[in-house]
Image (cartoon, grey):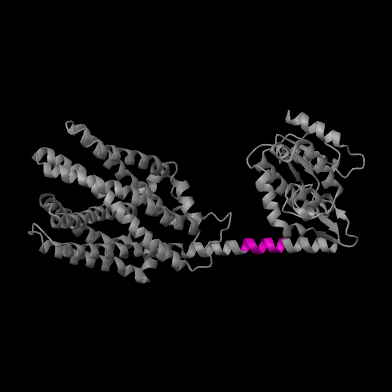
Amino acid sequence: MNWKLPFDIPLITPTLGLPLEFFSILGIIVFVVHICFIYMLIGASTASVIYNIMGVFKKDSNYDKFAYRMTNYTTVSENMGALWGVAPLLVISVLFTGFFYTAILKISPHILHIIYGNIIAFLLSYAYKFSWHALENHKGFHIAIGLSAVLAFFTLPFIFMSMSNLYMQPELFASINNIWEIMFTPVTGFRLLNFFLSAFMVTGVVLIFVGARWVKKGDTEIGKIAISQGKKWFLLATPLNIVVMPLLPFVFTARISEALMHTGFIYLPFIASLLLIVAFLYVLSKFKDEVVTSQSAFRVVALVLLSIFLMATTREGVRVVSFAEPLALQAEATSEFMNASIAEYKKYKEELANNNISILTDFLDNEFYIREFYKEFVEPNTPKIVLCGINPGRKGAGKTGVSFLDFRSLSKILPQLKKDDFEKSGSFIYSVIEEFGCHNFYENIYVTNISCVGFQNSNNKNNMNYYQVNPDIQQILFENFINEMKTIQPKVIIPLSKWVAWDLKKLNDEGRLNFNIGARLNHPAYRNVKKEDYVSRIHSLIN
């Protein structure tokens, strides 16, 4: 199948060595907790407005009190739903990064509705709750606030479901161009129907359960209302949900549905429906009872929770079968990318060896000090004046990993470092730094080289420069430098060698660099180099 998937940057699934099954189980558990709160949020916010209206028309204060109590369940569900929603979202975004973010980009900018839609809905629901008594004599306006909050909450599942359905069906990436093309599909429609039916079903169960507890605590009138209304919610929503659930696996693309048929996941929606049938019949048998025990209510809660868990597992099954082939292709692309990179590395390494050239790697042993230096003195994302040399030397940056500083100089900057290796260039640059003070210098100046690595002659151990190596290797070094400059966004680049000046000009002329190149300074190793030239130039550039 021609997937047309984003394999430009092959990705390795980061699992910390743990099996994917572990994350699947974790994802199911946290999702069940999250979705139950979301179900209650949708149901409780709706119920509160309905019974607020009923209280007005019936002129019954018990309905008003009951509606007010529902606002507590709304606000708790808001916060807990958002909190528990973070974990499954992170699991999905990390394990299925390429697919998840491709789907987000496909339906942008409407995905932003999840942010501002949530903010609006949260604010309206809190305004509805905390203005209850203040607007007691303005019920129409107060109900309008609550209804607005409900409508805002109702818009969010449409965005979430569209995004979820798209990322789980990557074969649609090539044909889907906006959110409307995935929203108005059978799979989104069926899943939304299941979502809202489940929300009203769960709300009914919760009302029966809390009603039984209220009656037990002596709050009989409101408890009876909760039980009575909870039964109606449950008995109206559940039968249709029993029909919808088994159909859900068959509304995805033919590839996914056919794959599910050969797994055990296909049976789970049918089992979930059977559990709901048992719960439905049990509640129906208690329909005429004004009061039910907490134990009876708990039995229904348990059956409903188990059915939700089975549907969440089915959802994970859809993801497993859907991503089996794309992840295999991604792994193949990653393997090809890595093999090609290794092959290229070996080729250039052999070529360098054949020319008696070796790469300086001593700096790898000093990673800790490199990190400490850059953390202390180099502020990212701040445009700076760049001093650009040739490449690290074997006695200086080739050992320290810090451009133009030897160990003697770096030890003065990092007191925890106790080494005395000396290099002329490193000593010279440090003398310039002293004129300004370390923090002041590095606040304004970024020191680097065209080549990120140094070279030496394998026979006589003398330094070699990047322009003495293979032209193909030079191009790799140039690209690395260009990317570094794109990050730094230099105000001006000052070459510290005529070779560097030539190559920077050439890169600019080719349209590859596109930054201002200043007049060069003599290289610090040059015999007639003067500190005053560096200091005066840097002063003028800073000012």
**Image position of 346 (left or right of 115):** right
Q: Residue at x 38, y 54 (%)?
A: 84
Q: Position of residue 32 (x, y in %)?
A: 33, 59
Magenta segment: does it hold 15? no
Q: Is residue 429 left or right of residue 180?
A: right
Point 34% across, 45% down: residue: 156
Residue 225 position (above or below residue 139): below
Residue 468 in picture, x, y percent from top left = 85, 52
Q: Quadrant of the C terminus?
A: top right
Q: Quadrant of residue 457?
A: bottom right
The one nearer the camera, 410 or 299, is 410
* Image quadrant assignment for residue 511: top right
> Which residue occupies the foreground of this view, 397 or 493?
397
Asked if residue 422 lies left or right of residue 237, the reply is right
Q: Is residue 299 left or right of residue 359?
A: left
Depicted 151 relative to depicted 287: above or below: above
Q: Quadrant of residue 154?
A: top left
Task: Tell me where the magenta segment starts and ends, as one range.
Answer: 336-344
Residue 198 position in % (x across, y down): 26, 56
User: With respect to residue 284, does 382 lie above or below?
Assistant: above
Prevalent SS, magenta region = helix
Residue at left offset 15%, top offset 55%: 217
